C-alpha cells in the first residue's frame, strides 16, 4: 500500500502550480488582449504598432541595458529638464561599441545613408543605432506638421539583422524621445513619456572635413527629437576630421568621404592622432571629443569606396552587402499587394493571378523639385511619356526574349500633379496608383503614398525610371536583385535627351 501523501505538502505544491498557471494565463490574456486591440490601420494618434513584428522585435535588446531611458548615457553631460527624470540611467553597455549618424537629405538619400551606416558598422564591428526618417520632402505642401517615421515601420529589421549576422538597433530602443507624435513601432507605451533630458555628445562632422567651404555640420532635425538638441539648436560638440577622409583629394569641392578612412577613425590610436579642438556644444558649452564608445557622424550619404555616387553602380558595397537584404516590413508588403490589386482593377475578393501580382512593369516618372534643375521650359526639359513608353517596350521585348515572359501590365508612379499628365498616361493603357481615391493619407498618414509607391516599384519584373532620381535608382536595384528583372532609365534635361 502506498504511503499517503502529506496533505500540507501536497496542497503547497498544488497551490504553487495553481499560482504559476494563474500568472501565466494572466500574462497570456493580457498580451492577447493587447494584440486584439491593435489597430489594422493607423490610429488618430499617429502611433503605429504592427502585429507582424510583435513576436520578432526585442523590447529589451541584449546589446542595451534595458528599455529606453531619458538619457542614453547617465553622466554629468546631461541636462535634466524635469526633477523626476531618470537622467543618471545609462542604457549603453560598457562592453559594446556603437555607431550612429543623422538624416537630413530627403527620404531616399537618407535611406542610402542608413545603408552606408550599417555597412560602416560591418567594417568597424560596431552595433549600428539607426535613426528614424525626418519629413524633409514629405512635408512639402502639407497643411499640417508631418511626424518622422521609424526605420522599422518601413523595413523588416529582424530579417535584415539575421541576414547580416549582426544586431541592429533603432534610437527608439535607446532613448526616450522629445517628439510626442512619432509614427512609431513600440512594444510598450511611451506615448506620454517624452524625453526631459538633454544629452551632450561628441561627434565627427564629415561634412566639414570633406570641403573647406563647409563651416557647419550637415543639418538635421533628428537629434532634436532625441533631445540631443534643444529647439533645433544642437548640443552636439563637433570635431572636424582630417582632410584625408576625402575620396577625391584633388578636387576640394567634391563632398564624398571614403569608407575605409572613416573606419580608421573608429579605432583608438587613429582617433587619438587626429583629434582637434572641438566646437563647444551650444547649450551646455561642453567641448567634447568624438565619443569613443558611440561613434557619431553627421551624415553618411556622401560616402563611397571607389567613385562618387557609387551607390548607382552594380558594385556598390552599400547596396550589395546591406541594401539588397533590406526588405519591406510585412505590413508594408501586405498594403502594397492591396494597392496593386486596386491599381489593376481587381475586385476585393478576387484572387490575384500570379501574372497580375508579380509580372508587371513599374514606371517611375520624377518631376517635382527636379524642375529647379531645368534651364528651359519644363515641357522641353522633362522627357515626354512617349520616351518612357519606348523604354517600356524595350523591357517587354527583353523579358520575352531572355525569360520567355509576356508582360502587359504597366503601373505608373509619379509625383506629377498635373491632370493632363495622367490623362496622357491613360492613352498608353497604363495603370495608376491613385492615393487620392484610396484615401491613403487619411487612412495611414502622409508617409504612406511614398512608402507604397516604392514597394510597388520594387515588385515589378521590369522597371523604367528617371535619370538622377535616387527613387528610381533604388527601385532599379530592387527589381534586379529581388525579381531578376529588367531595367531601363530615361534621360531628360533637353528635347530628345533619351533618343537612342
Image (tube, rainbow, N blue to C red):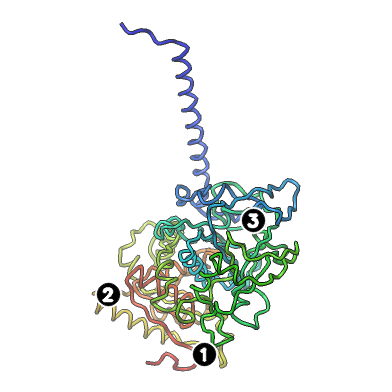
Q: Residue at x 45, y 10 (%)?
A: 7
Q: Foreground mark, 1 or 2?
A: 1
Residue at label 3? 177
The residue wearing badge 1 is: 381
Q: Earlier in the sequence, mark 1 or mark 3?
A: 3
Answer few, some or many: residues within 10 Å of disc 3's Cα (few below 14, many 20 plus, some between 14 and 19). Answer: many
Q: Which mark is residue 406?
A: 2
State yes or no: discs 1 and 2 in contact (Cβ < 8 Å): no
Q: Is residue 399 left or right of residue 330?
A: left
Coordinates of residue 130 in the picture (x, y in percent): 54, 61
Q: Do the residues bearing badges 1 and 3 touch, measured as CB atoms within 8 Å?
A: no
Which image quadrant for residue 362?
A: bottom left
Q: Would you place residue 266 above or below residue 85 in this image?
A: below
Q: Which mark is residue 350?
A: none
User: Which element carries disc 1, helix, strand or loop?
Assistant: helix
Q: Position of residue 420 (x, y in %)?
A: 51, 82
Secondary element at tag 3: loop
Mark 2 secondary-structure assignment: loop
The spot of residue 460 in percent (x, y) is 37, 71
Location of residue 375 by image quarter: bottom right
Distance between the Cα atoms at labels 1 and 2? Answer: 33 Å
Q: From the viewer's perspective, is residue 372 above or below residue 15?
A: below
User: Is the residue marked by circle 1 packed among few (<14), some (14-19), or many (20+) residues within 10 Å?
Assistant: many
Amino acid at each position: 500500500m502506498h504511503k499517503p501523501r502529506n496533505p500540507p505538502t501536497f496542497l503547497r505544491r498544488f497551490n504553487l502550480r495553481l499560482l504559476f498557471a494563474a500568472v501565466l494565463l494572466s500574462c497570456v490574456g493580457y498580451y492577447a488582449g493587447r494584440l486584439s486591440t491593435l489597430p489594422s490601420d493607423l490610429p488618430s494618434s499617429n502611433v503605429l504598432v504592427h502585429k507582424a513584428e510583435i513576436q520578432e522585435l526585442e523590447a529589451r535588446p541584449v546589446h542595451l541595458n534595458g528599455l529606453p531611458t531619458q538619457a542614453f548615457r547617465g553622466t554629468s553631460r546631461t541636462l535634466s529638464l524635469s526633477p523626476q527624470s531618470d537622467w543618471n540611467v545609462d542604457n549603453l553597455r560598457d562592453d559594446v561599441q556603437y555607431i550612429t549618424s543623422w538624416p537630413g537629405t530627403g527620404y531616399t538619400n537618407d535611406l542610402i545613408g542608413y545603408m552606408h551606416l550599417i555597412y560602416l558598422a560591418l567594417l568597424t564591428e560596431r552595433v549600428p543605432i539607426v535613426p528614424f526618417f525626418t519629413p524633409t520632402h514629405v512635408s512639402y505642401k502639407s497643411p499640417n506638421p508631418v511626424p518622422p517615421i521609424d526605420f522599422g515601420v518601413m523595413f523588416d529589421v529582424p530579417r535584415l539583422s539575421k541576414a547580416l549576422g549582426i544586431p541592429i538597433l533603432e534610437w527608439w530602443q535607446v532613448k526616450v524621445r522629445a517628439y510626442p507624435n512619432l509614427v512609431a513601432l513600440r512594444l510598450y507605451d511611451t506615448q506620454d513619456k517624452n524625453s526631459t533630458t538633454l544629452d551632450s555628445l561628441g561627434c565627427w562632422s564629415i561634412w566639414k572635413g570633406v570641403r573647406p567651404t563647409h563651416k557647419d555640420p550637415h543639418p538635421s532635425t533628428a537629434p532634436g527629437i532625441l533631445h540631443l538638441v534643444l529647439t533645433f539648436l544642437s548640443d552636439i560638440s563637433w570635431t572636424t576630421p582630417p582632410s584625408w577622409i576625402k575620396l577625391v583629394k584633388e578636387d576640394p569641392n567634391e563632398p564624398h568621404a571614403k569608407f575605409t578612412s572613416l573606419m580608421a577613425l573608429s579605432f583608438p590610436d587613429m582617433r587619438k592622432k587626429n583629434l582637434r579642438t572641438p566646437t563647444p556644444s551650444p547649450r551646455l558649452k561642453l567641448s567634447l571629443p568624438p565619443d569613443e564608445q558611440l561613434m557619431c557622424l553627421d551624415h553618411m550619404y556622401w560616402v563611397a569606396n571607389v567613385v562618387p555616387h557609387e551607390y548607382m553602380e552594380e558594385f556598390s558595397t552599400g547596396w550589395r552587402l546591406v541594401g539588397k537584404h533590406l526588405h519591406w516590413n510585412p505590413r508594408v508588403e501586405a498594403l502594397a499587394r492591396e494597392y496593386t490589386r486596386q491599381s489593376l482593377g481587381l475586385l476585393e475578393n478576387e484572387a490575384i493571378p500570379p501574372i497580375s501580382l508579380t509580372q508587371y512593369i513599374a514606371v517611375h516618372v520624377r518631376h517635382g523639385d527636379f524642375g529647379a534643375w531645368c534651364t528651359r521650359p519644363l515641357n522641353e526639359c522633362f522627357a515626354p511619356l512617349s520616351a518612357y513608353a519606348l523604354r517600356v517596350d524595350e523591357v517587354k521585348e527583353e523579358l520575352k526574349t531572355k525569360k520567355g515572359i509576356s508582360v502587359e501590365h504597366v503601373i505608373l508612379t509619379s509625383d506629377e500633379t498635373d491632370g493632363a499628365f495622367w490623362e496622357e498616361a491613360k492613352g498608353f493603357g497604363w495603370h495608376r496608383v491613385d492615393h487620392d481615391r484610396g484615401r491613403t493619407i487619411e487612412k495611414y498618414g502622409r508617409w504612406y503614398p511614398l512608402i507604397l509607391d516604392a514597394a510597388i516599384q520594387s515588385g515589378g519584373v521590369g522597371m523604367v525610371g528617371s535619370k538622377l532620381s535616387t527613387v528610381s535608382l533604388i527601385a532599379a536595384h530592387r527589381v534586379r536583385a529581388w525579381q531578376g528583372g529588367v531595367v531601363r532609365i530615361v534621360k531628360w534635361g533637353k528635347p530628345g535627351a533619351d533618343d537612342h
